[in-house]
Amino acid sequence: MIRLHDVSKTYYPRGRGDGAVTALRHADLHVPRGEIHGVIGLSGAGKSTLIRCVNLLERPTTGTVTVDGQELTALSGAALNQARHRIGMIFQHFNLLTSRTVFANVSLPLELMGMKRAAIRERVLPLLDLVGLADKADQYPAQLSGGQKQRVAIARALASRPKVLLCDEATSALDPHTTGSILELLRDINQQLGLTILLITHEMEVVKSICHRVSLISDGELVEEADVGDFFTAPRTRLGRDFLNAFLELEPPRALIERLEETPGPHSHPVVRLAFSGDAVSTPLVSRLARECGVDVSILQAKVESIQDRTLGLMIAELMGPAEKTREALDYLESHDLQVEVLGHVQRDD
Ligand SMILES: Nc1ncnc2c1ncn2[C@@H]1O[C@H](COP(=O)(O)OP(=O)(O)OP(=O)(O)O)[C@@H](O)[C@H]1O
């Protein structure tokens, strides 16, 4: 439904000949019909640029953007405006017109399309119902909470019956409870209307709650893409692991980090981060390591998380025993479908 092929974007701020900023580099992305795809990254990584390239609010410097089979980068003027009706967008700060009522905000895109008043009413009232604001039609944005404003923005984005909804940090200005209710609404819309959703966020919680797939963006590059369950079990990049650890608050204690050495010494223990899902979650791992490998396991941190329909277990542990035994234990763990990352080695106290 959404396809970016080799899309790059360089900004040339006016008056600064040498100030060019390349915000997006050779981005390839495919979001199939009906999928919710998240793009996560740190501030300045290029998320806004990427999502704004999809509806050509920013025109890519190079590359092509295709939405619902139509190459938008080949269009301009009226044809591009027409194509944009099939792409709704919502923003972090809602972007409502303060002088218009809720009803008038939602009807605006239809007025601009030249639709008749009666037809607009017929279209807008069910949308207000869908977003749970049927009783707020005559109120003004200033009378609404942040969550209600975002609901108005969602209704407005859906007014032209788009195939695609772009969400630019749509919940970043909202408290966690309101964030939850807006994400639930987006999930309902995705299911009820079959809408394809591309969202950008810096919050793992958003990805975890509603996305099917996720891409990670760093310094303008899409560096990793995975199903959400896989990303939360075994991110492939250092940055992905940093995001996951920060989300799970799963880091070794600071005092231990300071003692971690990269290479094993003659008298050191490996400290490992283990992630296990599926059947492995219910395996009595610690006692097996002790029994079958003769290694003691000191658990430094552990957590079980539900990621959509999967259960994910995470543990940071020190494997204590002679070098050949701890090596055997690592082999044992790897052969049992666990994701094993050696964080470093600490000198043995014994
Ligand atoms: N209009 C612009 N002109 C010049 N540089 C820009 C422009 N818009 C963005 N940039 C630069 O492009 C890079 C990526 O910015 P972008 O806003 O896409 O990142 P982001 O991941 O959305 O960040 P944030 O989460 O902070 O909004 C940054 O270095 C930014 O300063």
Image (tube, grey):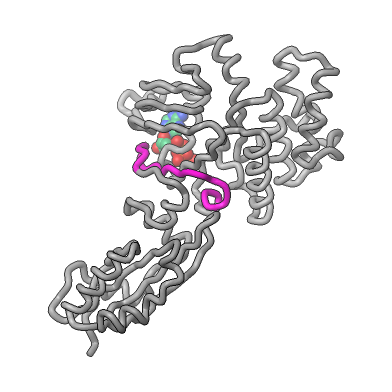
| Residue 220 in the figure: left or right of residue 229 | left
Q: Observer-nearest residue: 108 or 327? A: 327
Q: Position of residue 123 (x, y in %)?
A: 78, 25
Residue 100 can be seen, yes or no: yes
- Above or below: residue 173 compared with residue 321: above
Residue for point 60% across, 42% down:
170
The residue positioned farthest toward the left in the image shown: 266
Ligand 1 quarter of the rendering: top left
Q: Position of residue 156 (x, y in %)?
A: 71, 30
Q: In the rendered structure, does residue 218 fall within the stretch colored magenta?
A: yes
- Number of numbered discs visible in the structure rendering: 0
Residue for point 37% across, 75% down:
285
Q: Position of residue 7 (x, y in %)?
A: 38, 26
Residue for point 51% across, 27% down:
1
Residue range (magenta): 206-223
Residue 10 can be seen, yes or no: no
- Above or below: residue 46 compared with residue 108: below
- Above or below: residue 134 compared with residue 236: above
Q: Quadrant of residue 301?
A: bottom left
Q: In the rendered structure, does residue 78 fall within the stretch colored magenta?
A: no
